[in-house]
Amino acid sequence: MGIYARFRNFSFCHAVSMRQLSMARLLSPPKLIAQFECGLIDRAQLHAAMAQHAQVLIEEMLHEREFPEESRWEQWRNRLAANRLSVQHGEIRIRELLHALSDLDDFAPADLLWNVAHRHVPLHCFFRTKRAPIFRIKSMTSAAAQAQLVVEYSEGKSTTVVRETFQLARDRRWQWQVISREAYMPMG
């Protein structure tokens, strides 16, 4: 029996962007590959880090299988949040803005968002409204060349939720860049 057959009740979306909760923050796979290509890490270090990412996915699958009701509610909340934003701003715009946030080195949920530009992964997979680590968009305003995002997130199993406001603008290549950010006092 293959891995997908064993976990047929598992919603793959939640594990696609999950990171390990119990260890120090991992770099996202694109950043690991960039470091490997620059010679900053060797092949063994790359494989070890990617194995940790795989372990995170497996742990998330096991958690979803152990708590199916909680997982269904979380998925429903995430779908609702993603659909509301998509109706207001469009899925492509949301993906572009989240991809700009994923490029930030000091942004804790960047490793949850590393594959947000992949359109085959549903948008709701990147939201985590109640289950740690939390990542949710509280508000968003956008125009053709400027946008403002207010996001809430937690790191790891922490119950401390940080709220940040990001101002983004398009550069001359028409890519979104973070021009300013402001963190609010931790909540909860």
Image (cartoon, rainbow, N blue to C red):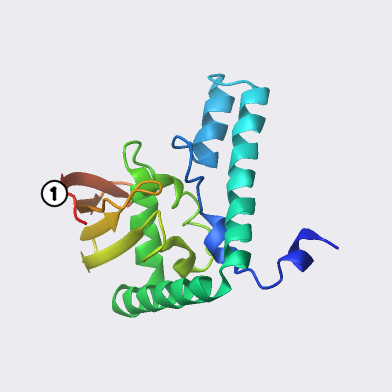
Task: Residue at 57% x, 72% y: name it.
Answer: 68
Q: Residue at x 40, y 67 (%)?
A: 92
* Rendering coords of residue 81 (x, y %): 36, 74
| Left or right for 149, reference 39 | left
Q: Is residue 65 above or below residue 38?
A: below
Q: Amino acid at mark 1?
A: Met
Say above or below: 85 vs 116.
below
Q: Please indicate whether residue 40 sits to the left or right of residue 90 in the image.
A: right
Observer able to see residue 120: no
Callout 1: few (<14), some (14-19), or many (20+) C-alpha neighbours within 10 Å?
A: few
Residue at (52, 70) in percent of width and height: 71
Q: Nearer the viewer, residue 37 or 163?
A: 163
Q: In x, y percent, where is residue 166? A: 21, 52
Question: For numbered disc 1, what is the local secondary structure?
Answer: loop
Residue 170, relative to residue 25: is it above or below? below
Q: Answer with the quarter of the image where residue 131 lies.
A: bottom left
The C terminus, quarter of image: bottom left
Which residue occupies the foreground of this view, 163 or 177?
Answer: 163
User: In this rendering, would 13 be left or right of 2?
Assistant: left
Q: Where is residue 74 shown, x and y percent of the image? A: 45, 71
Residue 53 visible? The answer is yes
Location of residue 51 by image quarter? top right
In the image, farthest residue toward the right: 1
Rendered image quadrant of residue 24 = top left
Residue 121 image offset from top left, x and y in percent? 55, 64
Say how many tags the image has: 1
**What's the residue at 62%, 25% (across, down)?**
45
Which residue position is annotated with label 1? 185
Question: The N terminus appears in which quarter of the rendering?
Answer: bottom right
